[in-house]
Amino acid sequence: MSEFQLSLLTIGLVVVIGVFLYGQWQQWRFRRSMGKPLAEPRAEVVHQVQPAENIDADSSDPLAAPPAVAEVADEMCGLLNDATDYVATFLLKSPLSVDELEILWERRFDFGKSVNACGLNTASGLWERMIPDSPQSYRAFKLGLQLVDRTGAVNEVRLAGFHDMLNEIAAQLKVEVRLPPLAEALQRAQQLDRFCADVDQMIGINLLTSSDRKLFGTEVANAAEQVGMSLQADGTFHLLDEQGATLFNLSASDGTVFQYHTLNQSRADSLTLLLDIPRVNEPVRRFDEMVALARELEKLLRLTMTDDQRVALNDGALAQIRAQVAATADLMSTGHITPGSAQALRLFS
C-alpha cells in the first residue's frame, strides 16, 4: 500500500470516528433537553406532604389546613369535635413549644371534665397529643374540653372558665382565636347528655347459690380462671379482649371486693355477671357470649341464673334481654356513636 493510499485510509477512519462521536453527542443533548434517560418509562408517583409552614396563620377558618396536614398521629386528636367537645384551634405565627401553654397545664384539672391538648407537629405535619414535657415544636394548638361523661354534662360556670382561659392563652400567644358561643355549647352538652343517659345501660345476670350455701372466694377465683377471667384492681374478675379492654366482669352481688390475699376468707351467696353495653363492640354478640359464660359458671359453681328479682332466667327471658341490648346498640348507632368505639369509651367513662 502506497503512502497516498495510507493517508486516504487514515482520513476515512478519522471521518467515521468523528461522525460516530457527533451522533453520540447529539443523543446526549437530546436526552438532557428531555430531562430523562432514554429508558422504559416507569409508573412512579411521588406523594409530597405539604409542610406545616404553609398553613395560613391569618386564615379566618381555624381548620383551613391542607388535608395532608390535618391528618392525626394520635387517635384522641381525631376525636375532638364540636359535637362532643368545646374546641378551639390556635394557628401560630411561628413554631412554639408546649411551654407556652403553662396556664393550661396549671389549670387543666379545674373544669370537671377531660381537657385534651393536641399540637400540629412542625416536623411531621401531623396532629398529636401534647403533654407538659413534649419536646417538639408546633405550628398550631388544638385545645378541647369534653362536654359530657358519665357524671353528666359540663356546667355553665366551668365551661365559662375554660372559655376565659382560652382567651387568656390567645392574648398571651398574640393570635386571634374563634371560640364557639357558650350558649350553643351548653345546649349541645345537655342534648348529648340526655342521649347518653338513654343508652347508658348495663345488663346483669345474677348467679345464686341454693339454700344458705356460701361461695368461698377461692372457689370463685378458680372457676373464673377456668373460663378465662382474671382478678383486677377493682376487686372483680374481668374477661378481657385482645386489646385488654373489659368485655364483662364478675363480682359479688353484695359489693364484696375480692383480693388475692383474702380470697380464702371472702364469702358470697351470689354473683353478678355484668355487660356494659356502650363500652363493648357488637353488644348483641357480646351478650350471647356472656350468657354462654354464665352457663359455664352455673355448672362449675352449682348456681342458678336469675334476673334482678331473683327469678330464674329461661330462654324466653334471655331473648327479651337480647332484644333490649340490640335496641340500645341500634339507638347508639343512630346517634353516630358506635358501641365500644374510642368516642364511646370517652363519653361513657
Image (cartoon, helix red, strand yellow):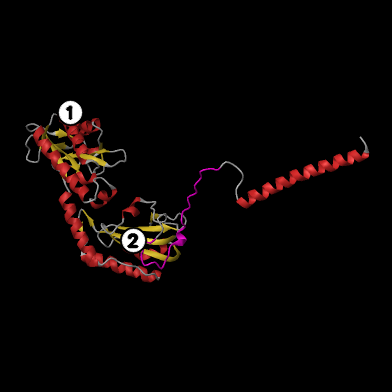
Q: Quadrant of residue 62?
A: bottom left
The reply to whether residue 258 is in sight is: no
Region rendered in magenta: 41-64
Q: Amino acid at mark 2?
A: Leu
Q: Position of residue 215 (x, y in %)?
A: 15, 33
Q: Residue at x 43, y 60 (%)?
A: 138
Q: Position of residue 184 (x, y in %)?
A: 22, 65
Tell me which secondary structure the magenta stretch mostly adopts: loop
Q: Residue at x 89, y 39 (%)?
A: 6
Where disc 2 sits, the SS reads: strand
Please indicate whether residue 105 sits to the left or right of residue 264 in the image: right
Whether residue 336 appears in magenta in the rendering, the answer is no
Q: Which residue position holds label 2?
A: 143
Residue most extreme to the right: 2
Frontmost of labels 2 and 1 is 2
Q: Is residue 63 above or below residue 336?
A: below
Whether residue 45 appears in magenta in the rendering, the answer is yes
Q: Position of residue 112 (x, y in %)?
A: 24, 60
